[in-house]
Image (cartoon, rainbow, N blue to C red):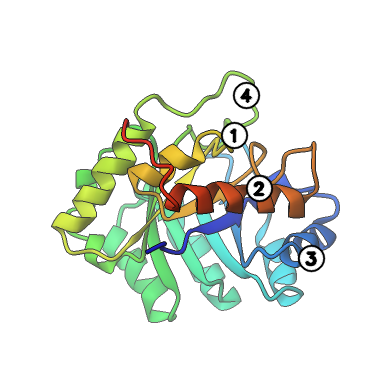
């Protein structure tokens, strides 16, 4: 039986000068959720979208906004975002001093919560908090460096996704695994086979310049459907 795979286009890959139009185009193409990165320059060398932009866009769209905070001050952004009411808020463990408290703040606002891990961060840091997580986001590249021509998915990406799936099973967690970074048409079957549930789609998939967003999204869905028809890759 095929499970539902969410394809969540990354807002920072859109035309930042025409965000409202871009979001409308993505929604009309059939996409239901939007991956929104909130980044401060202390955490990563990028700061493309601010809180007020997210608030205004959400008011004009019926898409689910899934916010990924990349900041050294999680509490500040979480307290601001719970007022905007996105579908989910995910923050980085690496900058989390009070990880459980941040999860509580999100859950108390009736918003789904998750923790993101940089590529080299081990899974066992989630040992005592994974039960409170709706999502675990695995960065497959170093956050904020996607513009680099030589920035590729880390070589242990598939292994880490597979281990994360096993980790969640061992802890009886129903958290979904989000994969973020260089998700391409070629890599999708292997990412699914490793255990990914949500694909953050960027310049290598939904935002490829050769086709429209609708055509790209259709191609992604065809790849997902073919995978569940039996086109699995056994190797990790």
**Residue furthest to the left:** 170
> Quick one: label 3 or label 1, which is nearer the N terminus?
3
Q: Which residue is mark 4?
A: 148
The residue indicated by pointer 2 is 219
> For mark 1, what is the residue?
45
Say what secondary structure mark 2 lies in: helix
Q: Is residue 76 visible?
A: yes
Residue at horizontal 67%, vertical 52%? 217
The label shown at residue 67 is: none
Q: Quadrant of residue 162?
A: top left
Q: Is residue 139 visible?
A: no
Instruction: State if disc 4 and disc 3 touch (CB < 8 Å).
Output: no
Up-down relation of residue 11 to residue 51 (above or below): above
Q: Position of residue 131 (x, y in %)?
A: 23, 66
Q: For residue 34, what is the image quadrant?
A: bottom right
Q: Disc 4 versus disc 1: distance between alpha carbons?
A: 12 Å
Q: Residue at x 50, y 35 (%)?
A: 187
């Amino acid at each position: 039986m095929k499970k539902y795979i969410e394809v969540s286009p990354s807002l920072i890959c859109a035309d930042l000068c025409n965000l409202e139009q871009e979001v409308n185009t993505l929604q009309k193409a059939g996409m239901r959720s939007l991956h929104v990165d909130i980044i401060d320059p202390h955490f990563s060398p990028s700061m493309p979208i601010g809180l007020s932009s997210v608030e205004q866009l959400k008011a004009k769209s019926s898409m689910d906004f899934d916010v990924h905070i990349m900041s050294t001050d999680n509490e500040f952004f979480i307290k601001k975002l719970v007022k905007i009411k996105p579908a989910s808020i995910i923050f980085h463990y690496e900058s989390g001093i009070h990880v459980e408290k941040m999860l509580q703040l999100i859950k108390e606002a009736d918003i789904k919560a998750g923790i993101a891990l940089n590529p080299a961060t081990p899974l066992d840091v989630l040992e005592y908090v994974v039960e409170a997580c709706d999502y675990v986001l695995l960065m497959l590249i170093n956050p904020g460096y996607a513009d680099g021509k030589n920035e590729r998915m880390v070589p242990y990406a598939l292994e880490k996704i597979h281990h994360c799936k096993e980790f969640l099973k061992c802890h009886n967690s129903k958290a979904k695994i989000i994969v973020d970074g260089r998700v391409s048409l070629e890599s999708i079957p292997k990412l699914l086979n490793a255990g990914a549930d949500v694909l953050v789609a960027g310049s290598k998939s939904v935002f490829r310049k050769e086709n429209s967003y609708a055509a790209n999204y259709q191609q992604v869905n065809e790849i997902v459907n073919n995978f569940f028809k039996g086109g699995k890759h056994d190797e990790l």
